[in-house]
Amino acid sequence: MSQLESPVGLLAVADAPEAAQQAVAGQVARALLGMIEGFARREVDVAAACGLGRRPDPEQAWDAMDKAIALINAE
């Protein structure tokens, strides 16, 4: 990504399989976000949209969104 020349405003998505997303938390997730932002050379958006509606328990969806909020609020 660091070599990629992209127009300002271009939207790109960095994604991982759902199992990998669930396994990564805390400082590891923050480090990955920092790496992605470094490659993109800008702040990026974070979303927890993958599979939220397919979760058997709505609390699992809320948990995923809470983790996304914690990630973007981490220093």
Image (cartoon, rainbow, N blue to C red):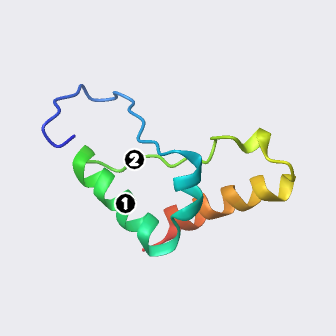
Q: Farthest right residue?
A: 57
Q: Is residue 66 above or below residue 38?
A: below
Residue 63 in the figure: left or right of residue 73: right
Disc nearest the viewer among 1 and 2: 1
Q: Which residue is mark 1?
A: 32
How crowded pointer 1 is (Cα within 10 Å; few <14, some 14-19, many 20+) is rated as few
Residue 49 in the figure: left or right of residue 75: right
Q: How many marks?
A: 2
| Viewport quadrant of the C terminus | bottom left
Residue at image x 34%, y 29%? 9
Quarter of image, res 68? bottom right
Q: Give 20 or 26, whichever is nearer the viewer.
A: 20
Element marked by disc 1:
helix
- Measured as percent of width and height from the top left, residue 74 is found at 48, 71
Q: Is residue 69 above or below residue 5?
A: below
Q: What amino acid is at disc 1?
A: Leu
Q: Which residue is mark 2?
A: 44
- Measured as percent of width and height from the top left, residue 2 is found at 16, 43
| Viewport quadrant of the N terminus | top left
- Measured as percent of width and height from the top left, residue 57 is found at 87, 53
